[in-house]
Image (cartoon, helix red, strand yellow):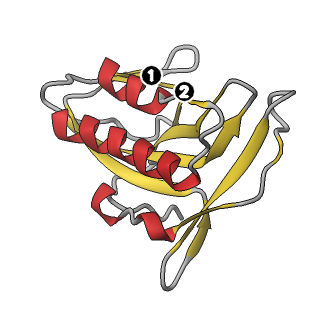
Amino acid sequence: MLAAINPTQLHSNSICFSPRTDNNVVRGTYFYRCLYSQESIMTSGVFIAIPLRNTTVNTTGKGFISFNIGENAEAVQAICNIEKTLLNRLDLISTVRVESLGVAARSGVIRNIVYSGQHQLGPSAIIVIRVSGVWEDDIGHGLVYRFIVPSHPL
């Protein structure tokens, strides 16, 4: 089961980060695990459902979803706000902020998706952004995220 909130339910005071650890994926970097806590549940990572209209899915290679930026301006803005909210909460001022999630949203192409292909995406789809934490190196920091297409309609 995947418990996802909508962007308006993301509250800054519910976001916590673990102490900095060595990143197991990229050598020479650090990782802060993101935790999200509400009254009745705590999750490792933040799962946020984003509705998109007129999507096209390409599942070759790592796969991607493309969409019209103009038709999805509200979703694009929500994704950018999510990134700002999470990075502001950790507040790493010693390195440059890398806002790759917002760049992906503003490009109209979302890469690195998890898509089982069990159902077809119609003219409108819901994708889930899973933010697992924040990476940091000597120069910058940014979100560690993945896009998920749920295996059944939400």
Q: Is residue 34 above or below residue 57?
A: below
Under circle 1, the secondary element is strand
Q: Is residue 50 visible to the viewer in this orientation of the structure?
A: yes
Which quadrant is the N terminus positioned in?
bottom right
Residue located at (44% from left, 63% from top): 12
> On the image, numbered disc 2 is attached to which residue?
112
Frontmost residue, 23 versus 123: 23
Q: Amino acid at mark 1?
A: Phe
Which image quadrant is residue 69 in?
A: top left
Label 2 vs label 1: CA separation? 6 Å
Tell me: 99 left or right of 17: left
Q: Estimate the x, y position of residue 113 in percent, counting from the top left.
A: 51, 31
Residue located at (48% from left, 55% from top): 47
Q: Is residue 127 above or below residue 107?
A: below
Which quadrant is the C terminus positioned in?
bottom left
> On the image, numbered disc 1 is attached to which residue?
64
Task: Determine contact: label 2, label 1, CB under 8 Å.
Answer: yes
Lower sequence index among marks 2 and 1: 1
The residue carrying pointer 2 sits among few (fewer than 14), some (14 to 19) or many (20 or more) residues within 10 Å by Cα, namely some
Residue located at (31% from left, 36% from top): 121
